[in-house]
Structures are given as C-alpha cells and as structure tokens.
Amino acid sequence: MPETREDLARHYMLSPRDLVSVVAKRGDTNRLGFAVQFALLRHPGFGFTLEEGAPEHLVAFMGEQIGVFASAFDRYAARPATASVHARDAEAALGLRQPTNADLPLLIEAGAKAAWSTDRGVPIVIGITEALRASCITLPSPSVIERAGIAGRARARLRAYDALLVGVSADSLAKLDAVLVVDPQTGLTPLAWLREITTAPTPDNVRGLLDRLARVRDIGLPVAIGDAIHPDRLRQLVREGRASSAQLISRYTPSRRRATLAAMILDQEAKLIDAALDMADRIIGGSFTRGNNKQKKSYAATTRDVGRIMRLFDRTVVALEEAQESGIDGFVAVDAAVGWDKLLRARGEARTIASLAGENPLLRAADQWSRLRKFTPLLLEAIDFKAGRGSASTIAAVNTLREMNRSGRRDVPPAAPMPFRKDWRTLVKEGGDKPDRRL
C-alpha cells in the first residue's frame, strides 16, 4: 500500500464523477466505507474484507476528500451486508468484475510470459496483476496469485527447454546424455573433464584445452540455438548447471536435463576458446620475456670485458692525443702505448658486445619456436579468425600458416603476407628472398 501523501494522491484522488457515486450513499459511515472500497479496488485491485479492514492512513486520506472523520469507518465493519452491496457497486462503477475459476488460464499464461526471462517472484506477480487489471478483473487472494505464478513459471521453463532443444538432432541429444555417463577407467564423467580448465601456460595445457574444445564441438549443437530463448534464461540455465553435480543433473527430467547441458556446452565452448587464446598469448609473450632475460644475462656476463675494452679505448685516445700534440705518428704512438695486435683482437670483442646490446627481441624469442610449434598448428585449425579490412593481411598470414601446416610445406612462400613492424620484416628476409620460417 502507498504510504506517502504524493503516492496516495496519485492512486486515490477521487474525480468529480467518483464523488457523485460516493455522495449518493446514505450517511457518513456508508460514504467513507464505500470510498475506501472504491480506492482499494482501484489499487492494488483486491476486494475489501471486513476481517483485514483497511490501512488507517488510507481511511484518513479518503475521509479528507469527502469531509468525513476517519472514526466513522469503525462502524462500517458492523454492516457486512452493506459492505457486500457497496463492493458490487464499486466494481460496477470501475467496470470491474470478480475473478472466477475460468480466469485461471489467463493468470497462468500471464505468469508464464512474465517468467520467460526470470524465475524471480516479484516480476511474475506483477505480470499477473497487470494482466488482470488490463482485463478489468479484481485481484483474487494472494495465495491464488502465488499458485498461478508458480504454475506459470513451470510453463515458462518447459517452453524454454523446448525452444532451446527444437533445433538439436537426435544424435546430438544422445551425445549430450553421454556426457553424464561415468568413464570406468577414470571414474569421472566427460562433463567433469570438460569443466576442467587449467591455467598454467604450457603447450600441453593448450593442447588439453583444444582437446576439450573438439569434444564439445563434436556434440554438434547449432550455435544459434541460444538465440531461441531469453539471454537471462540462458544464463540462468548455465548458472544452475555449474552449481549442480553431474549426478544431480542426471536426475532432472529429460527436457530440463538436456536443456541445462546444452546451455552449459554452449557456454563451455566460449570459455575454452577464450582460455586457449589467453594461454597461447601468455606463452608467446613469455617467449619474448625469456628471450629478453637471456639477452640481459648474456650482456651482464660481458661486464668485465666491456670495462677492459673501454679502458683500452681510453688509452688509445690518450695516445692519439699525445701524438697530435708532439707531432709524432699516431700509429707508432698507439702501438707503443697499447699494442696494435691487442687493439685488433679487442675489435672483434667490441663488435660482438655492441651487437648483443642492440639485438632485436625477436631473435631471442625465436629460440622458443619449437615450443610454440607444439600447439599453434592445432590452435590455428580450431579457431576461425575474423577481422575487418584493416587486418586483412593478418588474416591472410594466418591462412598461409594454416595451409603450410596442412600440406607439410617447410618453406614460407616468398610472397607471404608479413603484417609486421618494418624491422621485423627486415629480419625475416635478412637471408635473401626466402623468409626465415622460425622468425
């Protein structure tokens, strides 16, 4: 029941026509009782009962409108016959009628429509009450509405199960049932195995995820079946399935069991794809991290050599400076101060250290090529990549790798697309026109 004065005015303000009906009753007690019944039938729509009475703030508000003290309502309860007559009069004035058993199908269907997207009680009750109001029927008792809501919710669930499974073949349904059968060798159901998603980024774990993805796809569920029901209902089926053990799911009715499994399998396919891509991304990123770490260690190991070569360089510069000031031959000065043979030997070391410092990370990352090869061919086959026009060359490169894997071809085609950074393209083709496959 509304309690604030604004809400009371919104629902219970009497129009001039309403006032005519109220004033026509004889005596303040009858006028106030009729006005209260009139208000309750309008909102929330329940008929008035002498046992339950009416909220005091509503009685007071209606009394204010017709100039009658609220205390007059106390005497109204002593006249049940009059109250019954007034109830019929108020219904007639509002164009309402009492509910009957023949209205139960209307209530259940309204509940089913409201429950198409949810199992929550309040939205379902609201759907039923709105349908009754739209049909100009006063609301039955709360217990009747509750039972109709429960029946409507059950009907909505069955409709969702049927809608989800209507496009699923008999073979796929049999495979759905099979995921609940315990494997005698492992003691686990296929469903339990499919639910296992490892997180450690290793090639074997990527392959394990792709094996599960292949098993999920082998069930053969049409991708679009999830569109047949409300997204909230689909998510609810997934949540129920995740929270239930295989043993509990197996005790569901056939339609509920299969619909729950279908929703879970659709969701699991997406989860497995995401997990496989994420893990592959971490392994590839880890290849660069390992390469960088190895490069840093190699460079750190040259610290003593770097100091020695820099000291040698310093002495060479000092010798040349002194030679210039004294007017002697620079070569002779350097040979005397440093030693020409020693300087030539240091040249090769300096070149190696300089190359190490400026080495491209891709070169070290390529050392992990064999590790990536353990799963990337399977990944490229399992995932159908799409992209906009701006990434067309990347998709073409993926397709090139996929065809090479399928045919067993070892050499990268000279004209293969290379959507890389310029310095990487240079490295890949550094040996000539034939691209370096590892890079």
Image (tube, rainbow, N blue to C red):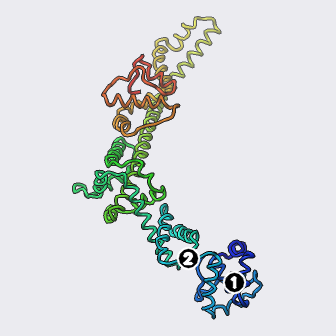
- Judged by depth in the image, the label closer to the viewer, 2 or 1, is 2
Q: Quadrant of the N terminus?
A: bottom right
In this view, the residue farthest toward the right is: 67
Q: Quadrant of residue 51?
A: bottom right
Mark 1: amino acid: Val
Q: Can I make out residue 312 in this image?
A: yes
What residue is pinned by disc 2?
Answer: 139
Q: How many marks?
A: 2
Pick the front one: 404 or 38:
38
In percent of width and height, residue 196 lies at 36, 53
Q: Can I make out residue 71 in this image?
A: no
For the residues labelled 2 and 1, say whether their Cβ atoms are less than 8 Å apart: no
Q: Quadrant of the C terminus?
A: top left
Question: Secondary structure beneath disc 2?
Answer: loop
What residue is pinned by disc 1?
Answer: 59
In percent of width and height, residue 220 lies at 33, 47
Q: Quadrant of residue 182?
A: bottom left
Q: Residue at x 44, y 23 (%)?
A: 428
In percent of width and height, residue 432 lies at 42, 16
